[in-house]
């Protein structure tokens, strides 16, 4: 964890993402800041006891911060008594070792290669599946390369594109001999969790958006599909009905949903046992 290599009383200077900031009042009437900080190793709590008003204006939730603090124990858990905290802007802390990848855990493979693999898979489809998925994936390419997937094994920067690529690879290895339409199966793999585009905010630690708090990922996925389908003058109703049924619980095409869910379950087992 974040402070495992430090002892009580040690002073550290480091970089974090602020994921929570709450103004509180002591029993003596003094304001202090109760802060949650995160880097790639985990989450740590911290408090600003002195000059809380001043430092509160120096950073916001969701931004990268530079801190100086002393390690203390509260209820036998290490946290930080913060003497200095400031938002990291531009390259102001570059000479002190600041790099975004120190704060945000990310996949260990090239997201560009993973994304290109997905694009090649889309290119193998027939229209209208191909043109629709090209539109969605190319218009949202940078977001797709960045966002995580909610499952713990892919809860990393780039996790969505890695997970989707792995599901496609798994499908290619065990492609069903049953009565499935390849265009429909691959399309469902590619749009099943595309709602993560709207589920997360565009910030350093991928906080959950307002829409993400209100709707399930698959509902968000369907909204994205429907919005893009509506940009076409003519789009096959049967394909539109397939996406609706597969994503928001219709009775038709259940066998496709079941098969894709089976692929996701196999992939999760593979990752659990490979750790």
Image (cartoon, rainbow, N blue to C red):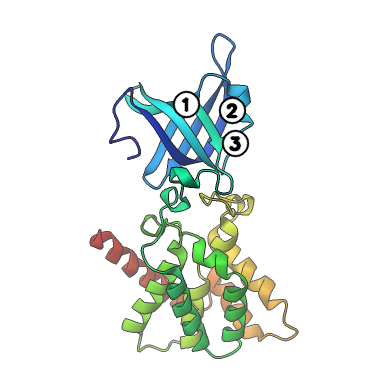
In the image, residue 165 sits, relative to residue 58, either above or below, namely below
- Mark 1 and mark 3 in contact (Cβ < 8 Å)? no
Q: Residue 111, relative to residue 100: is it above or below?
A: below
Is any part of residue 249 visible from this angle?
A: no
| Residue 9 image-quadrant placement | top left
Asked if labels 2 and 1 touch by Cβ distance under 8 angstroms, the answer is yes
CB of mark 2 within 8 Å of CB of mark 3?
A: yes
Who comes first in sequence, dot 1 or dot 2?
A: 2
Q: Give me the residue at 59% from left, 89% from top.
A: 127
Residue 98 is left or right of residue 175, and the answer is right
Q: x%, y% of residue 194?
A: 54, 67
The answer to which of 180 and 35 lies nearer the viewer is 35
Position in image of residue 8 (x %, y %) = 31, 24
**For marks 3 and 1 on the same chain, the one whose residue lies earlier in the sequence:** 3
Quadrant occupied by the N terminus: top left
User: Which residue lies under the disc numbered 2?
Assistant: 55
In this rendering, the answer to whether 71 lies above or below 149 is: above
Nearest the eye: 161 or 17: 17
Question: Front-most of 99 and 249?
Answer: 99
Which residue is identified by label 3? 59
Q: Under tag 3, what secondary structure?
A: loop
Q: What residue would you read off at disc 1?
A: 82
């Amino acid at each position: 964890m974040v402070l495992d290599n430090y002892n009580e009383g040690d002073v550290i200077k480091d970089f974090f993402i602020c994921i929570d900031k709450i103004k509180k009042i002591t029993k003596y009437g003094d304001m202090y800041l109760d802060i949650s900080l995160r880097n790639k190793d985990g989450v740590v709590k911290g408090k600003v006891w002195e000059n809380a008003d001043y430092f509160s204006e120096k950073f916001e939730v969701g931004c990268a911060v530079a801190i100086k603090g002393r390690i203390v124990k509260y209820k036998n858990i290490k946290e930080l008594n913060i003497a200095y905290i400031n938002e990291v802007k531009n390259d102001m802390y570059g000479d002190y070792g600041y790099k975004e990848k120190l704060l945000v855990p990310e996949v260990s493979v090239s997201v560009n290669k993973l994304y290109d693999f997905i694009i090649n898979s889309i290119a193998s489809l027939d229209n209208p599946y191909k043109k629709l998925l090209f539109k969605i994936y190319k218009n949202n390419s940078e977001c797709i390369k960045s966002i995580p997937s909610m499952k713990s094994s892919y809860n990393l920067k780039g996790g969505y594109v890695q997970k989707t690529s792995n599901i496609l690879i798994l499908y290619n290895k065990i492609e069903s001999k049953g009565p499935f339409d390849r265009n429909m199966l691959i399309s469902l793999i590619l749009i099943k969790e595309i709602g993560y585009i709207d589920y997360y905010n565009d910030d350093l630690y991928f906080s959950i958006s307002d829409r993400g708090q209100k709707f399930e990922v698959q509902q968000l996925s369907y909204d994205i599909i429907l919005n893009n389908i509506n940009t076409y003058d003519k789009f096959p109703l049967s394909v539109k009905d397939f996406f609706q049924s597969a994503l928001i619980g219709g009775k038709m095409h259940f066998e496709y949903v079941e098969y894709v869910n089976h692929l996701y379950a196999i992939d999760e087992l593979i990752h659990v046992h490979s750790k």
